[in-house]
Image (cartoon, coloured by chain):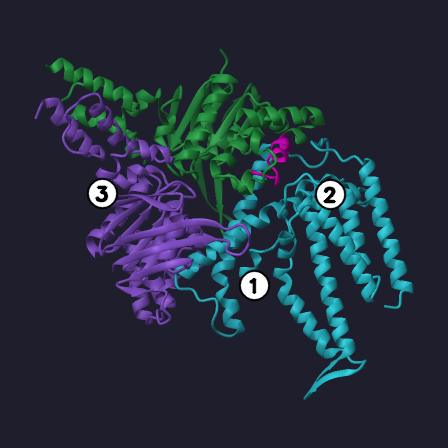
Chain colours: A green, B purple, C cyan
Amino acid sequence: MKPFINASGLVHEYSRRDEEGNVTGINRALDGVDIEVIAGSFIAVLGANGSGKSTFAKHLNALLVPTEGTLYVDGMDTSEPDNSLLIRRTAGMVFQNPDNQIISNVVEEDVGFGPENLGVPPEEIWQRVEESLKNVGMYEYRKDSPNHLSGGQKQRVAIAGIMAMKPKCIILDEPTAMLDPAGRKAVIKTARDLNKKENITIILITHYMEEVTGADYVYVMSEGKVKMQGTPRQVFARSEELVKYRLSIPEVTKIALGLSKKGINIPKDILYVEELADILLKLKAKSF
Amino acid sequence: MSIKLQNVNYIYGMGTGKEKQALSDINIEINNGEFIGIAGHTGSGKSTLVQLLNGLERATSGDIFYNGQNIYSKSYNMRNLRSKAGLVFQYPEYQLFETTVINDVQFGPKNLGLPQLEVELRSFNALKMCGIDDSLLDVSPFALSGGQKRRVAIAGVLAMQPEVLILDEPAAGLDPAGRDEILGLLKKLHNENNTTIILVSHSMEDIAAYVDRMVVMNKGKIVLDGKPEKVFQFEKELEQIGLGVPQAARIIHQLKDAGADIKGEPVTTDESIEAIYKWLKGF
Amino acid sequence: MVIFMIRDITIGQYYASDSVIHKLDPRVKVVCTFAYIISLFCFSQLSGYIIAVLFFWGITKLSKVPFKFIVRGIKPILFMLVFTAMLNLFWTSGGNVLIKIGIITITEEGVKRTVFMALRLIFLIVGSSIMTLTTTPNQLTDAIEKLLKPLNKLKVPVHEIAMMMSIALRFIPILVEETDKIMKAQLARGADFESGNVFQRIKSMVPIIIPLFVSAARRASDLALAMDARCYNGGEGRTRMKPLKYNGQDIAAYLIMALYITVIIITGRYLPL
């Protein structure tokens, strides 16, 4: 099967300039990234601040174009300027700061902004707005001002705004970094639901370990490169490497790892509290 | 420096017809040298509380005592209070404004009217404490990375040498290593300088790992107050107010619920590993 | 303190309701607000003010916006109001002298002018707040865009201007909140905004203004990206979720406005008081 997203040897360079605008140096934000994403999957890209993960996200949305290498989104070359609008409606993007991506003062008008830009007829815009807001559980707030919503609610409105463009894929660029735990949970749950129920491909960019446990596949980025990849279990089992990349592992994985270091016979790739409790109780029962 | 709040109430928007009680009947005493965590979800009143603590907002009713002195008495010097109780806001890097890192850090101590030598000394020390390299002193603060900016901003408050340091979500948005750096810095300040630290956070893991005492707020009230291991026993209650407990405590609770005879009330990963190990080995 | 007053600005704050005024076509509201403001300068006697107040009162009632919200708009201009009032009071000559202290002379004409000027300013502000309180910024932008469309022929970027206005309105409350936060953060670092002479006070604003600019620039660049990501590509080929269409009540509103203007003009011309 042809991958939905295919990055190969992707390089992005920023040039640093002094006050007169002369180039003083070049930063390689992406340095030969190879990532493949199968349609309908839930992918997580983990990385510390400055690892290049957000730059990668911007490439997926054709907000940046490759310096070297290629990136195809749904078969479209992102370096082709004529493709950019089509790529953006195919793979929509949700950003980190909830305030800075809401354009209108009324929730429903904001959700309608994308379809308006696409030239969708009014009756259909209304239909899409209603559907998208219901999908993210924000329909009852449709007449409200975004300023009165919590951070998590604003992010869900932003997701609805993307959904209204009927994308095949949503890229979430650190969508929870500015939220409290309750808001974080709600946003991740929304992304999961869209993946399961609407078969939307999700690419979640984050540095919160707890959020990626449910992903189908995880890429770990550092210094512009993909350093690790695998299922969440495979990745979290390699905790020393993660720490090297300024990341960590969920507490429960840490506990399992700690016990295994002490000589307890226990898998190192545990992701959930219930799972660990289960294994430990069985282990205890056996020892009698 | 001890702080005592007595029957403190705070009502938002007095006289606008949209009054909202942000704090109701807060009574708490914070002792000299404590490392205390304040937890609560957005809108629980914790941010209002810290603004009362350094006099930026004034309680609608009730009294606040610093070292036994009522800060609302007429003779009390409010600006002096602000220098003694340093407050680091959420995303403090948004307050940077000077042309160089060192100038920005000097803003606070300069405002205290200290002699230039003292201002410089304090600023250098604060930057060092926060792990900012000397080579960055004359760099524009806007050219730094996110984590560095955050530490420069914190240095700006530290340079005032407050007796109490209050921080509102100091690790928000930072990656795990950046978070550990900031929280490690607080631990160091607490251990070396005996600074009283008040850490506002909604990360239960951070609170469990760093504080001696935690206060849980909900709907403008203090609902729980005590050592983390005691407070985290109220897992259901904490979950109901949108907070939960760290995974390290949750695993212990689950095992105990299933009949496991685990000793103690561990809340950090290290404590949990130790307790589970002992239980498995039958100690 | 100027900065503290920013918090009270009503402009750009929509008050959700389902009143007749809310449902009017935004073009009607823009045109009528404009006409109302002009009307304030078409008379100079008491009877005119009474009519203007009554008309305004009627619209307010219909809009279901609480009176408190409307008056709040006056607070930020209070300083300007008092200042112009003073000027008028002290500098107008003519009529009977009421008070004379040293070089200060207050005349009957001066008092009259002062009161009327202040009233005009107040109604100018509250009149426009009624429009912004009952119209969402998006609607407002649509209206301005449609009304100014003829200017497109003169190469005026009407759509872009309208879009910029709408975004400015959305971000005013956010930046106001941010100003408040930055101010508190600097106060916590011992900043002093209240003492010293004028120059010192202006200088003391630097620690607020720079972070505010930096933040506004960051927000602007974030927003530009977010708009690109949502396929924004200028006004061309765009459809509208809420297309503007005049219907019966809009025509009625225009007629009522025309009637009001006629009455005001007649009053201004022919009524003595």
Tell me the SS state at disc 3. loop
Disc sitting over residue C21 in the figure: 2
Judge whether A24 appears above or below A132 on screen.
below
Specify start and end residues of the magenta stretch as a single range. A102-114
Quarter holding residue A247: top left
- Position of residue C109 measured from the top left corner of the image (x, y, whole percent): 79, 76
Is label 3 on the same chain as label 1? no
Pinpoint the chain carrying mark 2: C
Mark 1 or mark 2: name the one nearer the start of the chain.
Answer: 1
Pinpoint the chain carrying mark 3: B
Nearer to me, A225 or A163: A163
User: Of the residues tagged 3 and 1, which is closer to the observer?
Assistant: 3
Q: Is residue B207 magenta?
A: no
The amino acid sitting under disc 3 is: Lys
Q: Quadrant of the N terminus of chain B?
A: bottom left
Which class describes the residues within 10 Å of circle 1: few (<14), some (14-19), or many (20+)? Answer: few
| Residue tagged 1 | C2
Nearer to me, B21 or C29: B21
- Position of residue B84 measured from the top left corner of the image (x, y, whole percent): 31, 62
Q: Quadrant of the C terminus of chain B?
A: top left
Q: Is residue A113 magenta?
A: yes
Say whether residue A20 is visible: no
Tell me the SS state at disc 1. helix
Q: Are marks 3 and 1 in contact (CB under 8 Å)?
A: no
**In the image, farthest residue toward the left:** B283
At x 20%, y 54%, the residue is: B192
Disc sitting over residue B227 in the figure: 3
